[in-house]
Amino acid sequence: MDLLRWTLIFLVIALIAAVVGFGGVAAGAAQIGKILFFVFIVLFLVSLFFGRGRGGPRV
């Protein structure tokens, strides 16, 4: 979940930079946030797919 947290941090940085008027910083932070979000989605789907085949713990 750290990756999703970093995505949200970069989103907040981009929003604050856009409000203050730093367009370049806002665009860069938004781009980094977008990349991190898509990496998070891909890793989540891969872990969901491969975790399904293991089954639960046997008692």
Image (cartoon, rainbow, N blue to C red):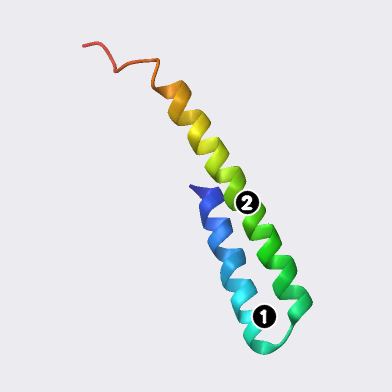
Q: Quadrant of residue 10?
A: bottom right
Q: Position of residue 35 (x, y in %)?
A: 66, 52
Label 2 environment density (alpha carbons within 10 Å; few <14, some 14–19, many ≥20): some
Is 3 located above or below residue 20 in the figure? above
Left or right position of 18 against 56? right
Tag 2 secondary structure: helix
Q: Quadrant of the C terminus?
A: top left
Looking at the image, which residue is at 67% across and 80% down?
A: 17
Q: Is residue 43 left or right of residue 18?
A: left
SS for tag 1?
helix
Q: Disc number at residue 9?
A: none
Q: Quadrant of residue 14?
A: bottom right
What percent of the width, then of the height, locates residue 56? 29, 18
Is the residue 34 above or below the residue 15 in the image? above
Q: Amino acid at mark 1?
A: Ala
Q: Say which mark, if any, is on residue 36.
A: 2
Whole-angstrom CA distance, mark 2 to mark 1, is 18 Å
The residue that disc 1 covers is: 17
Q: Residue at x 52, y 56 (%)?
A: 5
Residue, far top: 58
Q: Is residue 46 left or right of residue 14?
A: left
Q: Amino acid at mark 2?
A: Leu
